[in-house]
Image (cartoon, grey):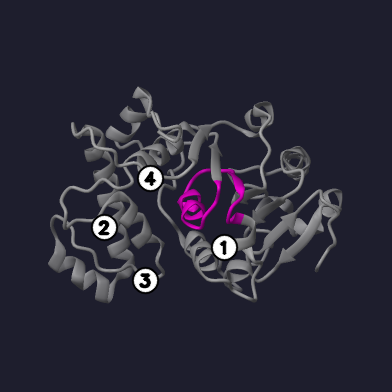
Amino acid sequence: MNMNTTLVSQSERDWVLNRQVLRLTDNKEVQIYPMGAERFLSSCLKQQQLKFYPIQEAIRGKNILTIPAHGNSSFLFAQAGARSIHAYDQDPVTIAWMKVFKKYYHFREAKNLPSIGELLDALTQWYPPRLRLAQGNHLNWIKHALCPNALRRTYVHYLVHLAQTALKDKDSADYELEADLTFHTGSLQEIIHSGKEYDTAFIPYLLGVKNGIEQQSDVIDFIYNLIKQIPCGVILVTPSQTTRDFYLFGKRYLETLHGHNLSELKAIKKFLLQNDDRWFRAQGLAVFTSKNPTNKN
């Protein structure tokens, strides 16, 4: 067996086959497909954006830890040349979907139809490309021209269908993504107990956000504990700003930190290397390190 072979348990198979799309941890919808943040991340990984933090340098050839594991950032890091990626999430349903996507990344129903990986790539693009599906192609052309978000929803539904079909398939062919990418159900405590150290940790939409680590004291403890696992690298946290997406009605991030930006928390400011306040529509990216940080703000 290849050391990177993904093992899917019976309970994980059942969740996917039964179309379980609510997290067990909080009964919220699982995020198993890329959103705007992943599209922005993909753009920065593919081509260096001079006005943003050079994230390529923190990923290529590095051992990556990502918490939580939702979306497709782990797959993007694999494509960007990461040496290894370990993705942790407390929700076992999220992990089940990620494992199936990785194990059957190259699975497709027919030669002229997209694979799971190609669907994820299409959903990561700012404007979804027109893909040939098993049915509904004429309607999809209209969606592509007039309502791209409707086309995205069609692709997401087909992605779920394809994952279920792959699990039912009796073919013994190997469809797995060839990458050192492993998904784990667990929290920071399991990471600490593993004793493994990493070059880079990527923490998207976890600290200071609802249904994440909400309390300021818990956010501080998280950074203090995590930085021990990244002794010579960086911790990338987004969002780091309280800025609204739009002035009056947009969503405000870091809602639970009561108006504080992550870079303003005194208890962890000594670890702050940089705060990119322009990262993804001013949501921000805070860069922490224990290796003699020199604040570049």
Q: Amino acid at mark 2?
A: Thr
SS type, badge 1? loop
State yes or no: discs 1 and 3 in contact (Cβ < 8 Å): no
The mark lying in front, picked from 1 and 3, is 3
SS type, badge 4? loop
Q: Earlier in the sequence, mark 1 or mark 3?
A: 3
Q: Earlier in the sequence, mark 3 or mark 2?
A: 3
Q: Which residue is mark 4?
A: 177
Q: Position of residue 179 (x, y in %)?
A: 45, 45
Q: Which residue is mark 3?
A: 127
CA distance separating discs 3 and 4: 24 Å
Q: Position of residue 43 (x, y in %)?
A: 50, 68
Image height of 195 relative to 234, above or below = above
CA distance separating discs 3 and 2: 14 Å
Q: Position of residue 184 (x, y in %)?
A: 52, 33
Q: Amino acid at mark 1?
A: Lys
Q: Earlier in the sequence, mark 2 or mark 1?
A: 2
CA distance separating discs 2 and 1: 25 Å
Numbered badge on residue 154: 2
- Highlighted magenta segment, given as a residue range: 59-83
Q: Residues within 10 Å of mark 3 (few under 14, many from 20)?
A: some
Q: Quadrant of the N terminus?
A: top left
Q: Amino acid at mark 4?
A: Leu
Q: Which residue is mark 1?
A: 251
SS type, badge 2? helix
Numbered badge on residue 31: none
